[in-house]
Amino acid sequence: MPRRSKKDLIEIFGYSPNDTTQVCRSLWDLGACPFLNKPCTKTNHDQSIVYGTCSVTSPFGDCIICPNRFYEKEFRAIRAVAKDAFGKSCDFLTYEQYIPVRDRKDTCIVALGQPSGKEVKIRRSLSMDWVLAKVQAGKLKEYVGIEVQSIDITGNYRDCWHSYKNLTTSTKIISSSGHGMN
């Protein structure tokens, strides 16, 4: 096992960066986010490399740097907000799930956000990451807005990422990450 630095990457494409299993590395090859099952958006500036970095170390513990990381297990965190806001009796549907059943569902919660329909705009300058809409007989009854925040980082982790990308059994040292907290 190579020696890891104090400043390190914790997850790449949802897995430990030193995970070389086929299940993990197939996501590297696809450039795919395992939390959304869509292309990852964490790229370099010219979009020629998909970094897939979900979380990193920080002085305060491991820290999520990609908001999509919060969407694991079919939007578990968003579903929890829906249950807290509207109770447990309503079905939770993404926008894509709601469309084909819109005429057959009496009451449900429809999650509207960037990976589910789109962000809801409020006039020209504001938007909400998510709006959970309680829909009854095709009509909006109630709603709640959600902002999802991961921390932004400074610097870069390029050398560290390449160390993990090219990891072999003979790798002795993983380059330190150059990230900082913003």
Image (tube, rainbow, N blue to C red):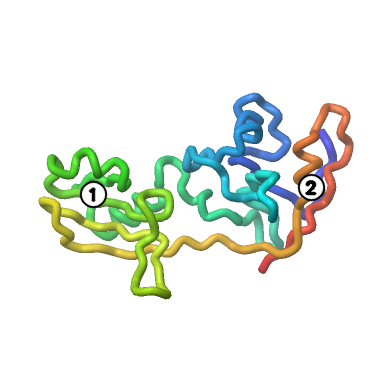
Return the x and y of residue 111 as percentages of the image width and height. 32, 52
Nearest to the observer: residue 47 or residue 57: 47
Q: Say left or right for 169 vs 21.
A: right
Under circle 2, the secondary element is helix
- The residue under the point 19% across, 47% down is 89
Under circle 1, the secondary element is loop
Tell me the quarter of the picture where residue 19 sits. top right
- The residue under the point 79% across, 42% down is 162
Q: In the rendering, which numbered label is found on residue 88? A: 1
Tell me the quarter of the picture where residue 58 sits. bottom right
- The residue under the point 33% across, 55% down is 112
Return the x and y of residue 28 as percentages of the image width and height. 65, 35
Residue found at the very far top of the displayed protein: 22
Return the x and y of residue 51 as percentages of the image width and height. 67, 46
Placement of 129 over or under 43, stated as above or below: below
Q: Say left or right for 81 vs 46.
A: left
Q: Amino acid at mark 2?
A: Cys
| Mark 2: few/some/many CA within 10 Å (<14, 14-19, 20+) | many
Q: Amino acid at mark 1?
A: Lys
Q: In the rendering, which numbered label is found on residue 160? A: 2
How many marks on residues? 2
Placement of 169 over or under 119, stated as above or below: above
Label 1 to label 2: alpha-carbon separation: 44 Å
Return the x and y of residue 114 as percentages of the image width and height. 42, 54
Tell me the quarter of the picture where residue 130 sits. bottom left
- The residue under the point 65% across, 43% down is 12
Q: Quadrant of the C terminus?
A: bottom right
Nearest to the observer: residue 177 or residue 129: 129
